[in-house]
Image: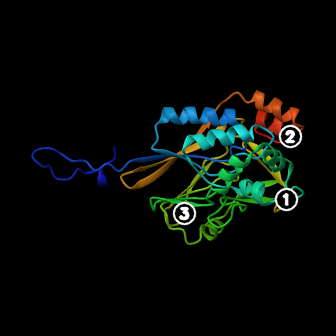
Amino acid sequence: MGLLGGIPPASDNGCLHYIVSTMRIALISDIHGNLPALEAVAADIRRQGVDRIVNLGDSLSGPLLPLETARYLMASGWLSLAGNHERQILTHTAAQRGASDAYAHAQLGEVELDWLRSLPATQLLDGDVFLCHGTPTSDLHYFFENAVPGGIEPATADDIEARLGHVTAAVVACGHTHIPRALRSRAGQLLCNPGSVGLAAYDDLEPVEHIVENGSPDARYAIIERTAGSWSAALHSVPYDFEPMARLAELRGRPEWAHALRTGYMAV
């Protein structure tokens, strides 16, 4: 339990009254239909003890278990955001959808699609924690990294400040890049990406051809904690049985997914 300023208020009739200021929030993101990874993360979060769980989007797209993952999330009661893949599943035509979005769209029914339509792109929690998928203004742009030919590199402080814009919340949480990171803005705000629950490596053609790799098949999440008015972050890495999902990806004609799921790297 946190004490306000570390000091209890004056006693009343000999009893000290402590001001409780602790809050623990689990951040998950980029599940990509990998239900076994999500179940492993949820079990680990239960062991940690948190006040709430929030999901930062890109929950279903991929060749794995989009329908089952949607139903799990719908039943969870967690706050979920829409990422770029939710938007693309809903708004892109069949010709525009890539293979991952096309497979997810084909598996979902109207109940699940209606749930996707209900998801916000951003959310402010208690005036203190701003949630987004990519950046506060875009579900496609990287926040803490820059894509360069072949890979990514850390964004500069100027890049991050420009992308943060006018958001003044004490915490800003994002997903999208699948890279777990915790850093501070120039104003001291906690900035956190929990990494990806379900896919530890991927490639992309925009804005340049590049790959992103975590180097481990583990599922990732984060816990942010407010104690006595100050926020901190802990990044968690959870092993799970990835082999069934890797075989499923192979069965569905996605060997690059299978390799990423098994190793955390893209195949050469």
Mark 2 vs 1, N-terminal side: 1
Q: Do the residues labelled 2 and 3 touch (CB within 8 Å)?
A: no
Identify the element where label 3 is drawn: loop
Give left or right: position of 178 versus 53: right
Q: Label 1 amino acid?
A: Thr
- The amino acid at mark 3 is Ser
Quadrant of residue 255 within the rendered picture: top right
Q: Mark 1 or mark 3: which comes first in sequence?
A: 1
Q: In the image, residue 210 lies at what x, y percent?
A: 83, 54
Q: Quadrant of the N terminus?
A: top left
The residue type indicated by label 2 comes to Glu
Q: How many marks?
A: 3
In the displayed orientation, state which residue is furthest to the front.
Answer: 110
Q: Residue 185: give its label.
A: 3
198 up-or-down from 159: above or below: above
From the image, tell me which residue sits under label 1.
93
Q: Mark 2 points at which residue?
A: 256
